[in-house]
Amino acid sequence: MDQLRQQLIPEKMPRHVAIIMDGNRRWASRRGLRVLRGHQEGAKTTRMVIETCSQLGIAMLTLYAFSTENWRRPRVEVRGLMRLIEQNLRRELPELHQNQVQIRHLGHIEELPVSLQRQIREAVELTKDNRGLILNLAINYGGRREIVEAARRLADQVRQGTITTEQIDETLFSQHLFTRGGPDPDLLIRTGGEMRVSNFLTWQIAYAELWITPTLWPDFTQAEFLRALCDYQMRERRFGATAPADKE
């Protein structure tokens, strides 16, 4: 573990890490356990990743906790997951606040259970002035819906005459997304081995580096997270430009 930490170069640390935390259900199924037990174990990994990002000075971490498509899961599982998210947030909030973590919510909060809405709003309000890690919790989030609603807001402004169509560019469009004001993800990690992005930060990950592991989220260790960061630091990010050797 210490050797992996020593390999990391502070100047090359990603500013924004986004994670699709996949595999809780499969972890529980393979052990003959209730699905909720997988989510409970996954919460321990979530805590570890947040702590590690804070320690390493990463500016922003976005966690895909519940998608707009996850409502299609069995009702019992959804209710249990909503309660678990609320309980974990309530339990962890004092320490997160003490460690200067600033919590933000991505998604449509009004469709969540009322008690969870209150807990999220309390966490956001309490930590809004913190200056440490920015923790984005994507709960009831969908990337395509985010883009559509941003387009609608811009269309309304054009109709009202406050902007013209010529003023709409990538910068202005980004200002109407949930992640406005923050950097796009530099590194997208997906656990569980699936080779897709599952409607997560569809606009924002255009140039993110991808790191996919078959490890299920409850089994994702700090060592593997550090390996992902080391691998990211070895990549050459060109954002569409040619490599120096290609120019010769």
Image (cartoon, helix red, strand yellow):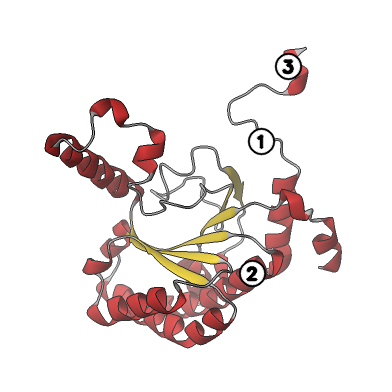
Q: What amino acid type should be assigned to the residue bearing mark 1?
A: Arg
Residue at point 36% right, 54% down? 178
Question: In the depicted view, which residue is nearer to us: 158 or 88?
Answer: 158
Residue 31 appears in the rendering: no
Distance of label 2 from label 3 (alpha carbons): 38 Å
Residue 28 appears in the rendering: yes
Q: In which quarter of the image is the C terminus?
A: top right
Horizontally, residue 171 falls left or right of residue 11, namely left
Measured from the top left, where is residue 8 in percent x and y? 79, 56
**Residues under numbered marks 2 and 1 in contact, where contact means CB atoms less than 8 Å apart:** no
Q: What amino acid type should be assigned to the residue bearing mark 2?
A: Ser
How busy is the neighbourhood of tag 2: few (under 14 within 10 Å), some, or many (20 plus)? many
Q: What element carries label 1?
A: loop
Measured from the top left, where is residue 101 in percent x and y? 54, 73
Question: In the depicted view, which residue is nearer to us: 132 or 28?
Answer: 132
Q: Residue 237 carries which label?
A: 1
Horizontally, residue 229 falls left or right of residue 41, namely right
Measured from the top left, where is residue 92 in percent x and y? 50, 83
Q: Could you tell which of marks 2 and 1 lies nearer the N-terminus? A: 2
Measured from the top left, where is residue 23 in percent x and y? 51, 64
Residue at point 24% right, 47% down? 149
Residue at point 69% right, 47% down? 232
Q: Could you tell which of marks 2 and 3 lies nearer the N-terminus? A: 2
Residue 160, image quadrant:
top left
Q: Pointer 2: what residue? A: 54
